[in-house]
Structures are given as C-alpha cells and as structure tokens.
Amino acid sequence: MITTPKSLRLHISFVGRRNVGKSSLLNALMRQQVSIVSPVPGTTTDPVEKPMELLPIGPVLFIDTAGIDDTGELGSLRVQKTRQVLERTELAVLVTEAGAWGSFEEEILRELAARKTPTVVVLNKIDAHQPDDALVTRLASQKIPTVRTSTVSGLGIPSLRQALLEAAPPDFIESPAILGDLVGPGEMAVLVVPIDKEAPKGRLILPQVQSIRDLLDSDAYCLVVKENELRRALDRLKSPPKLVVTDSQAFLKVAGDTPLNVLMTSFSILMSRFKGDLQMQVQGALAIENLRGGDRVLIAEACSHHPIGEDIGRVKIPRWLTQYTGVQLSFEHMQGRDFPEDLADYKLVVHCGACMWNRREMLSRLLRCQQAGVPVTNYGLTIAYSLGIFERALEPFPAALESYRHAAN
C-alpha cells in the first residue's frame, strides 16, 4: 500500500531556539524516538521529517528544525534550512522555555504572522520554570493559543495535541478538488496520458494519479488514454465528455483532436489552481508579450529528477518561448528548494505545477515573486500561451479566462 504523499500532508513544524525541547516534544507527541535528544545545544542540524496520522485531521508531516538562534558558519546554514521550512509550514509550533520569552520568539512570531501561518505557542519545561502569566494573556488577546508542557512528566502533551487539532487551517480539512468540481457527479473526464520518460517505471506521474482519485471521489467517470488514441476514444463514446485533460507537452495534438464544444486543459494548469494561484499565474503569462532579447527568464522546478535530453523545463519550454517571441532569451534553471534571494533582474519566472509540494510552499514562492514585482506563471500556461491556445486551455476556468481577457484588452 502506498502511503499519502508528503505534498498532501498537513506540514506541522516545530521552531524555536536551541535546546528548548523541540525534539523532546515531537518525540512525546509521536510516542517514539524520532529526533535525537541531547542537552548539547544544536543537536538537531538538518530538519527531521516524520509522517503520521493525527486523527481526526488525517495525514500530517511533523518537521523538527534546528534552533533559530544557532551561531557560527554552520549555524547560519542551519538557520537558513529552518527558514526554508517556514516556506512550507501550514501550522507552526513555536517552542520556548517557560519564563524565557524574548526577541527571538517575537521575531519568529512576526514572521509567522506575516505569512498568515496558524501558530501554537508551547511554554515548555514548566517543571523547572513557571510561565509568565502576562505573556499568556497577551498572546490570548492576539488569538494565539498557548500550551504549558513538560516532556519529563508528560504534562500538557494531550493539550498540545488538542491545540494542534483546533488550530489546523480549514482549507486543509476541506481541501479543494483538483478537477472533480469541473466535471461533476455522473459526468466523464478523459485524461490524456503520454507515457512520460521521466516517470518511474511502471507508474504514472503524480498529477495523473491524483486526478484519477479526485474524479472517483467526486463520483465522476474517468477514461484514460494515450495521446494517439484520443480521437478514436472520443468517437466511441455515446456522449461527449465534460472535460479533456492532457499533459501539456501534447497540448497541440490534443487541442486538434478535441471537439470545440468539449472543454480542454492540462494537468499542469490544474496544479496551478490546486497548489497555487491560477489567476496570478494567468496574469503572469501576459509578460511573455513584453519579453525582449537578452531578458532573463527563470525556469523553476520543484522536482529534483535527473533531466533527460528533451526535458520540458530545459529544452521544450525555452524552445517554444523562443519561437513565440522571436528573440534570444537568457534562460536560467533551478530545481528543488533552490531559489534566488534576489529576483529583481528577472523579467519572468516560469514554475512547474509543484505537484510534489504542499500548497503553502507554492504560495510562499508566488508571494516572493509578487513582492519582487516579477511576473510568475506556470509550465502549462506558458506552453498554451506560446502555442496560441491560451484561451482554449482556460475555458474550464471562467473567472481566470475573464481576467485574462480584461487584462489583454
């Protein structure tokens, strides 16, 4: 049985200074030795991840981080890793020792508030120190829950678990559909699935698998075909499907084989809506019109797979953009969680659908582009725009299509 992927788990991160008991708290919650515990400050170096079922929420990913006050050259690298974790944190547990609240905690709290990340404050080690009642009152006035704990006696651990349940963001509990809402119960979607050379042998890639499951959960029908079989499959249906979804690399052929009265889009564009902000990335695609020779374009991919000869990000998208604009652009590529600190010199960021990430991490990256004033769009949107089928690919999303038409005119 394949477990729930990390991208669909609620990311709960333990953050705070060194040696305040973050690892001990995680071990107590998990009822097992997940993180190494030591009285030596800085024991936790790289983030430690542990998947778990936290009922009634469901699948979660606990992340133990290095102390945010770590020092020295290596300490700075650890702090950088911790701040990367904040990019994908959906629920934060800010841990401090009772009676030791200070500027570090205030800074973290401000950063979490700026990210609109729900936060639970844990006043740990109450067996050794008494918490500051004034602090608890002030946090309560800010609607930030506090829990008093001791990992030595186990005091407060059940309360912490309950606080996490109550603080979980509603959009995780009521997660949006990938495409089930576009199809509807009793209706059919046809999924066009080229056999991707970069997919694991014997398996489909994640967006395809998730789309199939989402359709089944929505009581819709699902027909899966390869791109060369689409027209024949449509001819054999007694009634047309509600939606055709294709891999973006087969956009032109699928657009030609799909009747105009049938809605069509791509898996990547579905991921733009599911993981990020579709309308923002639709607006970002308009920047393609303004690209000039020598402009820097960043192509960012969440996966860190080894690229093949005809890689979509390194070969195909640069080729299609160059053909559309008619100018020589300067393309740069980044994978995984690597991303430039300074985006100001880029004229466009083209991002993958981030199927391997949770939505919070993708939204954090979009926010960074927005703050830098740099347009950001999506693989599928870029391909559709470059191939001249942008409006066709947006027809399943009326609000996004209308915003595009309004901006384009």
Image: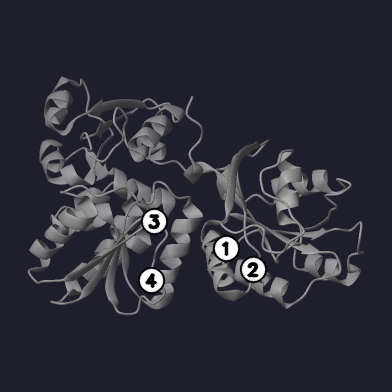
Q: Looking at the image, do the residues carrying marks 4 and 3 touch, with CB atoms under 8 Å apart?
A: no
Q: Is residue 403 visible?
A: no
The residue lying at 33 percent from left, 61 percent from top is 281
Provide the residue designation for mark 1. Answer: 82
Q: Looking at the image, do the residues carrying marks 1 and 2 touch, with CB atoms under 8 Å apart?
A: yes
The residue lying at 24 percent from left, 69 percent from top is 297
**SS under mark 2:** loop
Residue 33, above or below 92: above
Q: Is residue 25 visible?
A: yes
Q: Position of residue 213 (x, y in %)?
A: 41, 30
**SS under mark 1:** helix
Provide the residue designation for mark 3. Answer: 336
Provide the residue designation for mark 4. Answer: 340
**SS under mark 4:** loop
Q: CA distance from mark 3 to mark 1?
A: 16 Å
Reading the chain from its start, which is encountered first: label 2 or label 4? 2
Q: How is the image coloured?
A: one colour
Q: CA distance from mark 1 to mark 4?
A: 17 Å
Q: Amino acid at mark 2?
A: Ile
Q: Amino acid at mark 3?
A: Gly
Q: Amino acid at mark 1?
A: Thr
Q: Position of residue 260 (x, y in %)?
A: 15, 41
Provide the residue designation for mark 2. Answer: 68
The residue lying at 60 percent from left, 43 percent from top is 50
Lateral position of residue 339 relative to residue 20, left or right: left
